[in-house]
Each structure stands twice: as structure tokens, then as C-alpha cells.
Amino acid sequence: MKKKIAVIGLTGGIGSGKSTIAKIFSDKGIPVYIADIEAKKIMVNDEELKRAIVELLGNESYNELGELNREYIAGKVFNNKSLLAKLNSIVHPAVSKHFKNWKTKQSSLYVIKEVAILFENDSYKKCDYTILITAPVDVRIERVIKRDKTDKEQVLSRMKNQWTDEKKIPLSDFVLENVDMELISGHVERVHNEIVTLLSLK
Ligand code: ATP
């Protein structure tokens, strides 16, 4: 019988370095599923989901080429919590289904699932272990301003929808501080070894 593949949820606030750390795991040969990227693909390729999105948000959700009209969708849901919750309630199950299917195709001890929201919506309960990436808020703001050519107000308004590290730390199995780039590989190696040990004891 095929051994069960463990799911390690990897999260962190905006600009904490989730993608940077996920790439290090991936370079080590660990399969990584980046939920935001996959969700965007599924929103374009899954006809049933597309129909549900159009029903919820209108025809303008897609342009004439069938591409996602991200600005329109973001504008619709940004300050409308109930609409955002409805959109999530149709997109999340589609992503979950896609993730489960993707996982069956992997052959490793564990996979990493990178998600922006893990604790806020209870989805951490579906993970075998969780990793939280942390960095001071001011450092994260600076990184995002530089990366996205945006301003502080924009970053703060995106941060508002996420829990603080203080709230997430007690729920995390591993906390990985991402400040000094030179220390990161060592942190990842340590977490990887601990996960392997824990899983082999299961
Ligand atoms: P988001 O939540 O917006 O998707 P993220 O958590 O995935 O962000 P990254 O995109 O990995 O964060 O990192 C944000 C920016 O900070 C990137 O430009 C990245 O290159 C840079 N960065 C990540 N880690 C470090 C570090 N330790 N030192 C300096 N820069 C870093």
C-alpha cells in the first residue's frame, strides 16, 4: 500500500517570505503547492467554477479572451466581507479538490502547501504540521513596497485581513524567522529534519 503523504501547511504574513522559503524546500526536492497560483489557474480552467464566479460577481469577471479580470474582482470584494466570504466559499473547495488530486501524484514523505491564510480560516486543522514564517512588520512592509512598487498604506490595508504573528505563533508547529538570508537554509534544514523525524515516528 502507498504510504500516506503528509501535508505541511506553510504560511506567514504578507512579505514574510513564504514564497522564498517554499522555493528552498522545492530546491531540496520537496513538492510544493502554491495555493494562490493554483487558485488563479483553476479560476480560469475550471468551467463549473467559472460559471459560479460569473453568477456571483457578474460577466465582467472574465474578459473576452476568458482571462480573469483580477482588478474587477478585487474591486468588488475588497471592502465587501460577505462577498469575499462567498467567493472564498466557492473557490476554496475547488482548490482543495485540485490539491488532493495533485498530492496523489507525488511520491515523497511530505508535501508543502503554501497558503496566505491558514489559521484565520481553520484550514490548518487539515495539515499534519504547520510552519509559520515570521519577520518584523516594518521589514515586511519595506520588502513588499520594494517588490510590488506600492506604498505603505496599500501594504497596511492588505495586512489588516491577516492575523498578527503573536496570534499565529501558538498555533504553529514550527516558527521560522526569515530575517537574515544567510541563516535561512540552516533553518529550513532543521525544520525538514524535524519533520522527517516526527513523520517516521508516526
Ligand atoms: P506575499 O504574502 O506578498 O505573497 P511572501 O510571504 O510570499 O509575500 P516573498 O515574496 O517570499 O514573501 O518575499 C517578499 C520579498 O522579500 C521578496 O522580494 C523577497 O525576495 C524578499 N525577501 C524574502 N526574504 C528575504 C530576506 N530574508 N532578506 C531580504 N529579502 C527577502
Image (cartoon, helix red, strand yellow):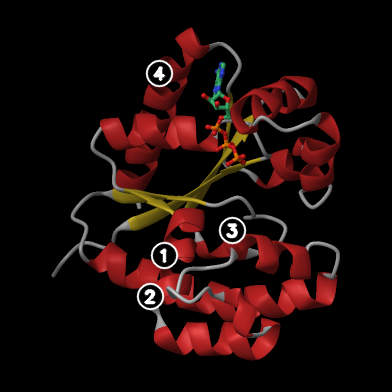
Along the viewing direction, whichever of 174 and 43 lies nearer the viewer: 43
Q: Secondary structure at mark 4?
A: helix
Q: Locate residue 104 relative to residue 23 in the image: left or right.
A: left
Label 4 near label 1: C-beta < 8 Å?
no
Residue pointed to by mark 1: 41
What residue sits 84% from the left and 70% below the top?
Answer: 80
Question: Is label 1's Cβ within 8 Å of ligand 1?
Answer: no
Query: What is the number of the mark on residue 45?
Result: 2
Q: Residue furthest front?
A: 64
For the residue marked with disc 4, what is the amino acid? Answer: Ser
Residue pointed to by mark 3: 124
Mark earlier in primary sequence (1, 4): 1
> Between marks 1 and 3, how big is the CA–CA gap?
23 Å
What residue sits 68% from the left and 40% below the top?
Answer: 13
Q: Is residue 65 visible?
A: yes
What residue sits 47% from the left and 30% below the top?
Answer: 20
> Between marks 2 and 3, how big is the CA–CA gap?
26 Å
For the residue marked with disc 3, what is the amino acid? Answer: Tyr
Q: Secondary structure at mark 2?
A: helix
Along the viewing direction, whichever of 43 and 169 lies nearer the viewer: 43
Circle 3 residues within 10 Å: few <14, some 14–19, many ≥20: many
Mark earlier in primary sequence (2, 4): 2
Q: Is residue 121 visible?
A: no
